[in-house]
Each structure stands twice: as C-alpha cells, then as structure tokens.
Amino acid sequence: MRLYAIGDVHGQLDLLKAAHQRIWRDGGRNSVIAHVGDLIDRGPDSRGVIEYLMNGQADGQPWIVTRGNHDRFLPKFVTDPDWIDPGLSSGQHWVEHAGLGAAATLKSYGVDPDIPRSALLNETRRAVPPTHVEFLANLPLWYLHPLALVVHAGIRPGVDLCDQSEDDLVWIRKGFLESETDFGPLVVHGHTAIDTATHYGNRLNIDGGAAYGRPLCAVAIERGAVHLVEDSGRLPLTPTSH
C-alpha cells in the first residue's frame, strides 16, 4: 500500500505537472495522489491548476484535493464579495492584501486586478467559470487514508476529527506545529512553508515553498517509511525533532 502527496501548489502549473510525472515514474499512472490544497494565488497560472486537476479527476485519475485557506478566497469573493477570512490577522480583504496573491490569480483569468473594486467583482464573475468556483468551494477539508490523514494546515490536538473546525483545518499553526501528540495516523499537511518536506514523527510538512520559488514537494508514504520523490529518485525522510 502506498500514498503519494503533493504540497501547496499556489498557481505553479508546470511544477504540479512535473511532480505528477515524478510520481508516475515512481509508482505508475494509477497512483493515488493527495494534494494538501492552496491551489491558487501567488503563482502565474491558478486557472490552469484548477482546470488541470478538474480534468484529471473527471478522467478518472485517483487524485484527492483538500481545501486550503487560499482556496476559500476566490469562491467567497464571487459569492460573498465583502467576506474577510477570519483567519487573517490583518483583517484585510483578499483583493487588498498584497501578500495573499489575489492579483496573480485574477490575471490568470484575464482580469485586471487594478480596476475599481465594483468593476473587479463584475469582471471576476464574468471571467471565472462557475465550475471553477464550485470546485474550490466544495473541496473536502481532509482525507483519511490507511497510511495518513491529509489536511491543509493541521488539526487541533485533543479534538476528534469530525469535530475539528474548518478554520483550524485550513489555518492552524499554534497548538499544532509544536505538539508532540501522537495523532494516531501520520498527519500530512502544508500551509507553513519550509525549505523542503520534513518528517516530525507525528506529522509531515510537505509545503516546500513553491509559492516563493522553491520546489513543489512530492512524497511517497508507505507503512513505516516516507520518501521525498525527486527527479533523481527517492530520498528517505527520517523523523526529526520539533
């Protein structure tokens, strides 16, 4: 039994396709691949990423895509334009917060992000296919596999999986990253960008910082072993301390 997982994509379609190619070379084209979310924002082709994953799933690829915090922004803007994510400490709107990467996402749909806010909403609604909005809005918050629990940000220690809040599942850092709790399954997550995939024993962070010009991590998870899947082959990931 084997599960593959891919870190935060952030609009990097070429890197996503390359990660899939590495996985297919390692395990074949029918490999089960889980994606930890944050499909959009910051990178150049958020539209292409969504289209690619949607088409793959429609063609029967065994791909699981969980919802990241960034994946909430675009569908919420289209359906509830004044919504501000409660996870944002700045209290700024998605299209006003320069660091969130809304401009790159809008440009990928052919929308000028610098037009007035009222016109921006209308242009976004015109340019973004409803199927893309529905895809992002309906992504699952977690995926439980016999080898791992895949979730975007992490989980609240001591809270049953079914009772976890969405805000924690897509935003949590404090209380999770420093925890040495045995969560039962290995928790595979992204959200917190680091230099490369790192195994902490109870959790595996696979956000290697593709949003910031670093590699998009792909890992192979098997019973008792985790490997980073690179162009040159497999690199074992052994547990390290928090």
Image: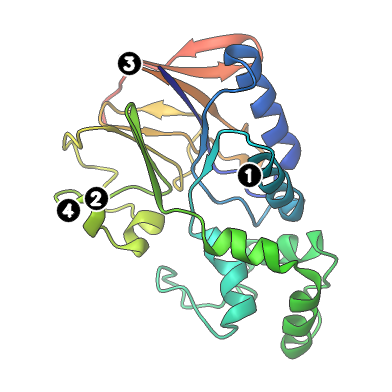
Task: Give the number of the mark in front: 4 or 2.
Answer: 2
Tell me how far mark 1 sits from mark 3, CA to CA: 32 Å
Quadrant into which the C terminus falls: top left
Tell me how far mark 4 sits from mark 2, CA to CA: 6 Å
Amino acid on which the number 1 mark rests in the picture: Tyr
Task: Give the number of the mark in front: 1 or 4.
Answer: 4
Outermost residue to the bottom = 118
Q: Tag on residue 212?
A: 1
Quadrant into which the N terminus falls: top left
Residue drawn at x 56%, y 40% as measured from the top left? 209
Q: Tag on residue 159?
A: 4
Amino acid on which the number 4 mark rests in the picture: Val
Task: Give the number of the mark in front: 1 or 3.
Answer: 3
Q: Is residue 70 left or right of residue 205?
A: right
For label 3, the residue is 223
Disc 4 residue crowd, few under 14, some 14–19, many 20+, Cα 10 Å: few
Disc 3 residue crowd, few under 14, some 14–19, many 20+, Cα 10 Å: few
Disc 2 residue crowd, few under 14, some 14–19, many 20+, Cα 10 Å: some
Amino acid on which the number 2 mark rests in the picture: Leu
Residue 147: x and y, percent?
A: 33, 26
Disc 1 residue crowd, few under 14, some 14–19, many 20+, Cα 10 Å: few
Q: Is residue 28 left or right of residue 64?
A: right
For label 2, the residue is 161
Question: Which label's residue is closer to the chain start, 3 or 4?
Answer: 4
